[in-house]
């Protein structure tokens, strides 16, 4: 699987400033790409373009060589699963219903799901520690639990590319580690994972590549240790950091995963 983004340029309204400007990058099997950048620089907008939600951009997005604009949402959903930043519920489905939506390429949400699909959804929920919530209303669980439900929904979709918009933003410390470990395992299994995060530790420790975005432009793309220098972080975020703590970390995927309790 390959994803190629070429010279992506987008503005929400004609004659307004470009939110994305000439963004180019590519990702291949096994990449865990962390997209970093301050609030409002265009990370979610870039994801929406890649996913085909926004189409009036210039430039191109190629999914396995096919221009994404030629694919409909179902075709895209077979290859890309998306975890949105907002977990706000629109309808009060049960948690199980929401997770089953990840299988809508295989089942109709209007018919009764097969036991096999329910089992699959249940296993995904169990692996994320939310199986006990299966009959709870999606609108009646916490923000972190909703985020885990959306991750479970993406997992059952079995798409080889996962685009995750701040997937750990609502999670407690333990769940952050568990979800990051799961993400790393997926990348080790050959999935392409592209995630935005405001947690530089996650990017530094787990990603094999970091894309730094500022003002809608990619200002750096490379291994974390090359991109996340104190100078660049000061330029982008206006804060001084010390990265010495990471110096002795063997930043390979497997070693940085905390051991199971
Ligand atoms: N629907 C919209 N209509 C007009 N402008 C929008 C819309 N959505 C986002 N924007 C603007 O586009 C810019 C980029 O927003 P985007 O959500 O992509 O940023 P982001 O990097 O994901 O930010 P954050 O880290 O805060 O989530 C911002 O200036 C935002 O105000």
Image (spheres, rainbow, N blue to C red):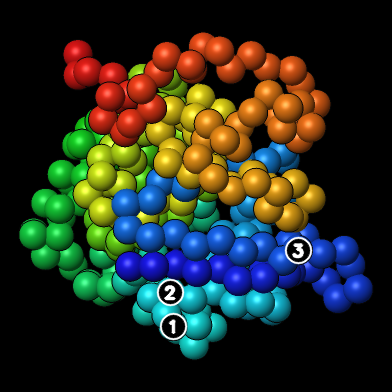
Residue that mark 2 sits on: 63
Q: Residue at x 65, y 46 (%)?
A: 220
Image quarter (top left, top right, bottom left or bottom right) of the C terminus? top left
Q: Secondary structure at mark 3?
A: strand
Query: Disc 2 to disc 1, how far (Cα)?
Result: 5 Å
Badge 3 crowding class, 10 Å Cα cut-off, few under 14, some 14 to 19, many 20 or more, is many
Residue 134 image-quadrant placement: top left
Question: Residue at the location (40% across, 33% down)?
Answer: 206
Marks 3 and 2, how far apart in space? 20 Å
Q: Label 2 crowding class (10 Å Cα cut-off): few <14, some 14-19, many 20+?
A: many
Q: Establish if 252 lies above or below 42.
A: above
- Neighbourhood count class around disc 1 (C-alpha, 10 Å): few under 14, some 14–19, many 20 upward: some
Who is closer to the viewer here, 184 or 254?
254
Q: Which mark is residue 34?
A: none
Disc nearer the start of the sequence (3/2): 3
- Across and down, in percent, residue 247 comes to 48, 16
123 left or right, relative to 210: left
Position in image of residue 192 (x %, y %): 36, 55
Mark 2–mark 1 contact, CB under 8 Å?
yes
Residue located at (51% from left, 11% from top): 245
Residue 174 at least partly seen: yes
Q: Is residue 120 left or right of residue 140?
A: left
Q: Residue at x 78, y 68 (%)?
A: 11
User: What numbered label is drawn on residue 21?
Assistant: 3
Q: Circle 1 sits in a helix, a strand or a loop, which is it? A: strand
Q: Which mark is residue 66?
A: 1
- Residue contact between numbered discs 3 and 1, judged by CB atoms under 8 Å: no
Reply above or below: 180 against 162. Answer: above
State yes or no: Cβ of the residue under disc 1 lies below 8 Å from any atom of ligand 1: no
Residue 157 x %, y %: 28, 60
């Amino acid at each position: 699987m390959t994803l190629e983004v070429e010279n992506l340029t987008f503005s929400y309204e004609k004659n307004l400033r470009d939110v994305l400007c000439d963004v180019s990058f590519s990702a291949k099997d096994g990449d865990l790409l962390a997209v970093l950048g301050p609030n409002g620089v265009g990370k979610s907008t870039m994801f929406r373009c890649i996913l085909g939600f926004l189409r009036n951009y210039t430039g191109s997005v190629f999914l396995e060589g096919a221009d994404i604009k030629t694919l409909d949402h179902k075709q895209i959903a077979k290859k890309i699963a998306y975890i949105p930043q907002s977990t706000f519920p629109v309808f009060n489905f049960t948690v199980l219903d929401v997770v089953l939506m990840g299988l809508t390429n295989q089942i109709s949400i209007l018919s009764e799901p097969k036991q096999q699909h329910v089992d699959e959804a249940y296993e995904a929920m169990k692996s994320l520690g939310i199986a006990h919530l299966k009959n709870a209303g999606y609108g009646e669980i916490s923000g972190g639990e909703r985020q885990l439900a959306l991750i479970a929904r993406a997992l059952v979709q079995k798409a080889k590319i996962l685009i995750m918009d701040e997937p750990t933003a609502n999670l407690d410390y333990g769940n952050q580690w568990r979800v990051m470990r799961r993400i790393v395992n997926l990348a080790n299994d050959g999935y392409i994972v592209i995630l935005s995060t405001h947690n530089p530790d996650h990017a530094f420790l787990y990603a094999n590549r970091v894309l730094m975005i500022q003002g809608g432009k990619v200002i750096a793309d490379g291994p974390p240790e090359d991109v996340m220098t104190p100078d660049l972080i000061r330029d982008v975020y206006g804060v001084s950091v010390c990265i010495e703590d990471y110096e002795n970390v063997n930043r390979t995927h497997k070693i940085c995963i905390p051991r199971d309790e």
